[in-house]
Image (cartoon, rainbow, N blue to C red):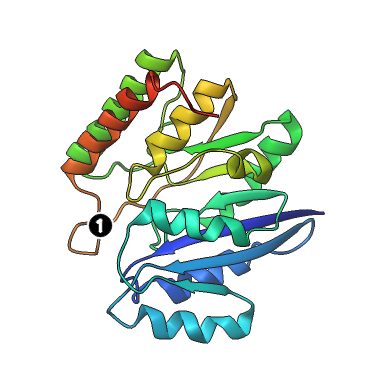
Amino acid sequence: MVRLSVIIPVYNEAGTISQLLARVAAQGSGAMQIEVIAVDDASTDGTSTLLQAARSDGVQVIRHPARRGKGAAIRAGLPRATGDLVIIQDADLEYDPADYGRLVAAALDHGAPVVYGSRILGSNRSSYLRYYYGGRLVTWVFNALYGGRLTDLTTCYKLFRRDVLASLPLRCEGFEFCPEVTALLARRGVAIHEVPISYHPRSIEEGKKIRWRDGLTAIATLFRLRWRRAVR
């Protein structure tokens, strides 16, 4: 039996959060036990009410009184995690929790401390070209700076052995969680295994929140951490 902690940063996802939580809960069968930690980043659209109702289904809910960002939400949820493994789950429906088994199997079968779900390795429809190429650029910069061989640094699905993630000196507040955690792992020499996942991109009209400025922040984060002395 493996226990998987799912940290879900949430901001204004009233249209998807209930369905997403149901999909996550459906993975908790057989040899995998699911623990769900939802961090409400000061939502204003009814998400908070839906999350409070989900407490009766065993969902742990943390609410930020003011909006701080995805990275801050993940860091707030991490101390609550008790699973052997931790995965990050966006609150929309772009990523399918049915892929959990594939990531967990890679961690167990290969003894991998970290597994990323790659949209590039899978046969998926691309998001807007600027998002697709922006993600590829950030990944290329990481590989060039850190000697990596990743295909998809900006993927949401990042699975960690809990002790590995908890040991990292994370300071991120926003979407720079992805480059920060990946850079810190690389500086420590922690191998990252990738597996293909499914991906169902949504449009800006449907609520996609990341913007071009976040790509610039990601690249700046990679450069900043490449030569920072204290990373342990």
Coordinates of residue 104 in the picture (x, y in percent): 67, 44
- Give the residue number, with chain letter if any, for mark 1: 208
Coordinates of residue 41 in the picture (x, y in percent): 36, 67
| Residue 3: quadrant of the picture | bottom right
Left or right: 187 in relation to 113: left
Left or right: 1 in relation to 123: right
Vertical side of 146 occupied by 54: above or below: below
Coordinates of residue 181 in the picture (x, y in percent): 46, 36
Nearer to the camera, 172 or 49: 172
| Residue 190: quadrant of the picture | top right
Mark 1 Cα-neighbour bin, 10 Å: few <14, some 14–19, many ≥20: few
| Residue 57: quadrant of the picture | bottom right
Which residue is at 24% across, 63% downward? 207
Q: Quadrant of the N terminus?
A: bottom right
**Which amino acid type corresponds to the residue marked 1 in the rendered image?**
Lys
Coordinates of residue 109 in the picture (x, y in percent): 75, 33
Nearer to the camera, 26 or 164: 164
Which residue is at 58% across, 36% downward? 115
Helix, strand or loop at label 1? It is: loop
Can residue 102 be spotted in the picture? Answer: yes
Can residue 122 be spotted in the picture? Answer: no
Nearer to the camera, 41 or 122: 41
